[in-house]
Structures are given as structure tokens and as C-alpha cells.
Amino acid sequence: GAGVSQTPSNKVTEKGKYVELRCDPISGHTALYWYRQSLGQGPEFLIYFQGTGAADDSGLPNDRFFAVRPEGSVSTLKIQRTERGDSAVYLCASSLLGTSGRKTQYFGPGTRLLVL
Amino acid sequence: AQSVTQPDIHITVSEGASLELRCNYSYGATPYLFWYVQSPGQGLQLLLKYFSGDTLVQGIKGFEAEFKRSQSSFNLRKPSVHWSDAAEYFCAVGAQGSQGNLIFGKGTNLSVKP
């Protein structure tokens, strides 16, 4: 079946602009995660959705970052007033509902964001 | 705080040779442990996972890992490496007291020489 998809695959923007990154999870997966992977680093957690609500947004670096999942499926990560330091690969993952920590997360290919 | 350490930034092995990638974790309880592989331009693919039970777990592509509580380690092994195994490998632990977000190490880049 179809895996996690993310669009666009690449995004180039200018400093100060607004961007939206989209994630389409595996059908039936109620949990959705966003991670950010900077060059040479492992992915870092940003936000977790259970259904439509953000259950844990402790990883969002500041209030320029926001994410929604209005119908409990597709999610959009929104970044306002982008900065060069936001350049990274943004990964989305989804999983079935399960005991905390035991859920296997399936990752999308990521969106590579470059802020000039 | 929970953390994952992958001591080796880069490893080169010859095709057909054995492989061991190291992973150490810091965690207060029984950890949930994962190994993912990432090829250039690709997302993360799960190789294997440990939740409980047998400490030697088998994964896809001929990989295995052993959980050693006394050493806080979860090293990844493969008896004979193939050129297609060249990639970035990430060890991760399921975060305690959370909804299951993963904490990743910085990764080990594996090169395979003919």
C-alpha cells in the first residue's frame, strides 16, 4: 500500500517568507509526527498529533512554527518569517495507535527546505 | 534526559566483511529501541526494533541487533555487507513519558568498498 507522502520534495524560499509543508500519512494511522533533520544530524522531534489535536508540541523551536491536522489525516507544517537557520529536511512519520513508545513510525521521504 | 549516542560518525568496510554499528542510550526505564536506515534523498526505513523479550532481534536485509542492558547498548550487526548497504544508519529510543516520539542519535555513515 501507499506509504507516507510529503510535498513538496524540495522548497527554496527567501528569508522572511512563509512556507507550508504537507504530509499525507498512511491510511488508518491516527498518530502523526513531524521531525526536523539538519545537515549531519539525526532527526529531532517537533510535534505529535493524535487525531486532529496536537498532543505534544514541545519540540517546536519557537512561535514561528505551527502545524495543523484539521481532519485527522493530512497535516501541514507552517513556518512564518523563515530564517536561514530553518533550512533542513522536514520529515513526517505516522503510526497506529498503540502503547506509548511501542508504536512503529513509518517515515516519508521528507521535504528539503532551503532558505536563502 | 534521554539520549542516544552513536560513537562512530563514519565507518568503511569491505564488501563481504562483517559490520557492527555501535549505539548507546541513556534511559531510566526499559527502553524501546529502533534502528533505521536512510539512503541519500530517501526517508527513514525501519530495520528492526526491540520492545521486550529476546534480546537478540532480527531485522530486514540480514541485520540483527542485540540489547545489552548492563552496557546500555543496542549494537547493529550484519555478517556480510553488500555494496547496497552503504547509507546512513540511525539508532533511536522511544521517549519516556511521551506519546512515543523518538530520540535519535546523530547517525553513522557507512561506506562499502569493493
Image (spheres, coloured by chain):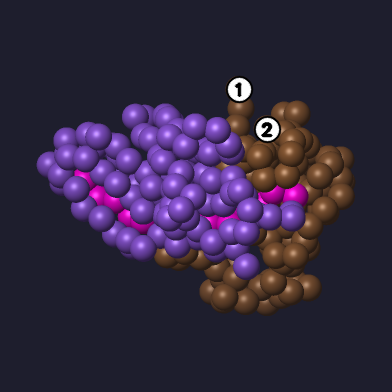
Residue A99, by quadrant, is top right
Residue A73, by quadrant, is top right
Quick check: can you spot residue B75? Answer: yes
From the image, state the color of chain A.
brown
Location of residue A27 in the rendering, given as x and y in whole percent from the top left corner: 72, 29
Badge 2 marks a residue whose secondary structure is loop
**Residue, disc 1:** A1
In this view, the residue farthest toward the top is A1
- Disc 1 crowd rating (10 Å Cα; few below 14, some 14-19, many 20+) is few
Q: Are marks 2 and 1 on the same chain?
A: yes
From the image, state the color of chain B.
purple
- Region rendered in magenta: B99-112
* Quarter of the image that includes the C terminus of chain A: bottom right
Residue B32, by quadrant, is top right
Quick check: can you spot residue A21? Answer: no
Image point (52%, 38%), residue name: B49
Does the segment drawn in magenta span residue B110? yes
- Disc 2 crowd rating (10 Å Cα; few below 14, some 14-19, many 20+) is many
Q: In the figure, B110 relative to A62: above or below?
A: above
Contact flag, marks 2 and 1 (Cβ < 8 Å): yes
Residue sitting nearer the eye, B110 or A85: B110
**Residue, disc 2:** A26
